[in-house]
Amino acid sequence: MAVEQPPAHAGEQTQIHNIGYRNYDGPRLGRAYARRSLFSQSLRGAYGLGRSAKSKVLPMILFAVMCVPAAIMVAVAVTTKANQLPVDYTRYAILLQAVISLYLAAQAPQTVSRDLRFKTVPLYFSRPIEHSDYVRAKFAAMASALFALTAAPLLVLYVGALLAELDFADQTKGFGQGLVSVALLSLLFSGLALVISAITPRRGFGIAAVIAVLTISYGAVSTVQAIAYEQGSTGAIAWLGLFSPITLIDGVQTAFLGAASAFPGGEGPSSGTGVVYVIVVLALIAGCYGAMMRRYRKVGL
């Protein structure tokens, strides 16, 4: 018969493993690497890359909506052997500004509101990354994503124009002017959308506010400009354009890039008034950056 052994003393069963802590001997990548990583992550997220499948649907559809009209115009120009494209490079983004506003309304809140809603912003600043690094990375990512959205159809138009054997010098000049225009548009629109989205962690409110600022303001300014034109107050049309983001871009490219104005009667700002437009645009971009810095200094405490 087996004899049951008495239980061992508790001290004999307890073992202490001295695993200690290892010092990290690898490279210290620092703030620059963190800033690039945040930029890359935010840029990918603006098109749903690295996220769920449903997150990719809307940005990719809007990207296609931006490019399909350009492809159709190219097909018509090639088929009919036209002497010029149906739409100027600088005019394309103005015509599709509703799509641009919808894209920003969907993606700008996603870029910043989630960090605010889930209170992860202080975690970023617990590392070497600074407030300015966070704001610059988010701003640059949103502007780059919007530039890709607006520049891609211009590239389609340019390649199609060359295939249609249109004048190389004229098309290259127009393409360059269009890139300058959409680059300025991307900086201004992204700054406004991010500032609006950073005010509230609620994504729905951010979407509605971005649409209101970018779309409703354009409709209101265009209506007042049309009224001024009908009443013969043509001198006020250019100054009224200062109160809407899309008319600001229209005024700058009309004054300095040789674009045809979308203002009533085609009366865009002169070069002198265009200087005011440029100052306002640059002041708005700088103001958006400063507002985001103040916002995240407060949130990151």
Image (tube, helix red, strand yellow):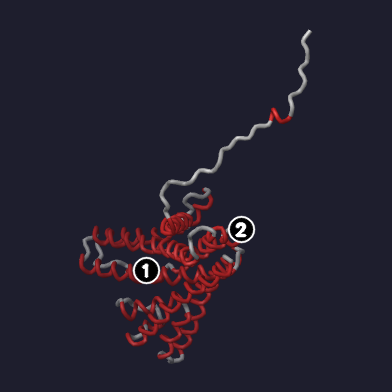
Q: What is the x, y in percent for residue 193?
A: 50, 69
Give percent across and percent down for residue 9. Answer: 74, 27
Residue 119's mark? none
Left or right of 282: which side holds 178?
left
Callout 1: 10 Å neighbours few (<14), some, many (20+)? Answer: some
Pointer 2 or 1: first along the chain:
2
Please identify, in this view, whether the residue under mark 2 or under mark 1 is nearer the observer.
Answer: 2
Say which quadrant the N terminus sits in. top right
Asked if residue 61 shows in the view, the reply is no
Q: Residues within 10 Å of mark 2 (few under 14, many from 20)?
A: few
Q: Residue 122 vs residue 184: left or right?
A: right
* 162 sits left or right of 236 in the view: left
Q: Give the number of marks.
A: 2
User: Would you place residue 270 above or below residue 28 in this image?
Assistant: below
Counting from the top left corner in percent of width and height, residue 112 is at: 53, 62
Q: Secondary structure at mark 2?
A: loop
- The residue positioned 33% from the left and 81% from the top of the image is 255
Residue 118: which disc?
Answer: 2
Residue drawn 44% across and 75% down? 286
Label 2 sits on what residue type? Phe
In the image shown, does 121 or 271 lie closer to the viewer? 121
Residue at the spot of label 1: 183
Residue closest to the eye, 268 or 292: 292
